[in-house]
Amino acid sequence: FVDPDNDESYPSVGTEFITDNPGLQSLYDKVTELGVTESVVPAWLPEDFVLTELQDLPISAGHKVHGKFENGNAVILIVYRISDDIKTKVEKKDAAVEAFEYAEISHFIVDNKGNLSVTWSVDGVECFVTTDIQKDDVYKVIKSIYRSELLS
């Protein structure tokens, strides 16, 4: 038996998206406007990251939402492909691919010379985060999608 309130790997389920980053709020508003109901938007980014670009691009059978966050030194790109026709396949032949299991979802992380890429999918949404921030912060970003109170 697991007590979700005392086990970080089982995030508490919340119905409200709460963030102190206005750019993340804009990104959340955009994907929910497009019908996304699953938790896919982080509630936390490292200090001083601001949204510098937000695009909603129509694609065949859906939308692609692109958010770019910058702090002057680093960049975080967050991209969602929203479609009823998502068939994500992640080839994990390379040992450099790390599967980070959180909230019963596999997040695949690849480190390419200091640039980290994270890929996962959930219920018709293919999610990508690409950044050059520290790996520990990438884990916090992922966790904040599901359990923002851990980052207070």
Image (spheres, rainbow, N blue to C red):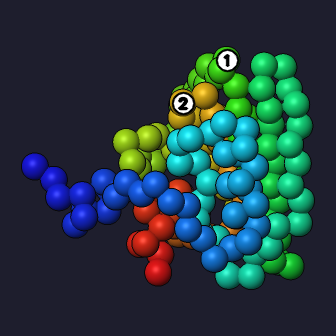
Image position of 1 (left or right of 78)? left
Query: Which residue is drawn at the image coordinates 88% and 48% (left, top)?
Result: 55
Query: In the figure, 125 relative to 130: above or below?
Result: above
Three-letter amino acid code at the position of disc 1: Asp
| Quadrant position of residue 3 | bottom left
Do we see residue 130 in this rendering? no
Image position of 36 (left or right of 48)? left
Give neighbour class at mark 2: few <14, some 14-19, many 20+ (Cα, 10 Å): few
Q: Secondary structure at mark 2?
A: loop
**In x, y percent, where is residue 11?**
35, 56
CA gap between label 2 and label 1 equals: 10 Å
Looking at this view, is 142 or 41 the one in front?
41
**Of callouts 2 and 1, the N-terminal one:** 1
Query: Which residue is drawn at the image coordinates 57% and 35% (left, top)?
Result: 121
Q: Secondary structure at mark 1?
A: loop
Identify the residue under disc 1. 85
Query: Which residue is drawn at the image coordinates 53% and 42% (left, top)?
Result: 38
Do we see residue 6 in this rendering? yes
**In x, y percent, where is residue 84?**
65, 20
Identify the residue under disc 2. 123
Query: In the figure, 135 relative to 109: above or below?
Result: below
**In x, y percent, where is residue 18?**
56, 68
Looking at this view, is 99 or 12 the one in front?
12
Q: Which mark is residue 28?
A: none
Seen as rendered, the residue at the extreme left is 1
Three-letter amino acid code at the position of disc 2: Asp
Query: Which residue is drawn at the image coordinates 72% and 44% (left, top)?
Result: 33
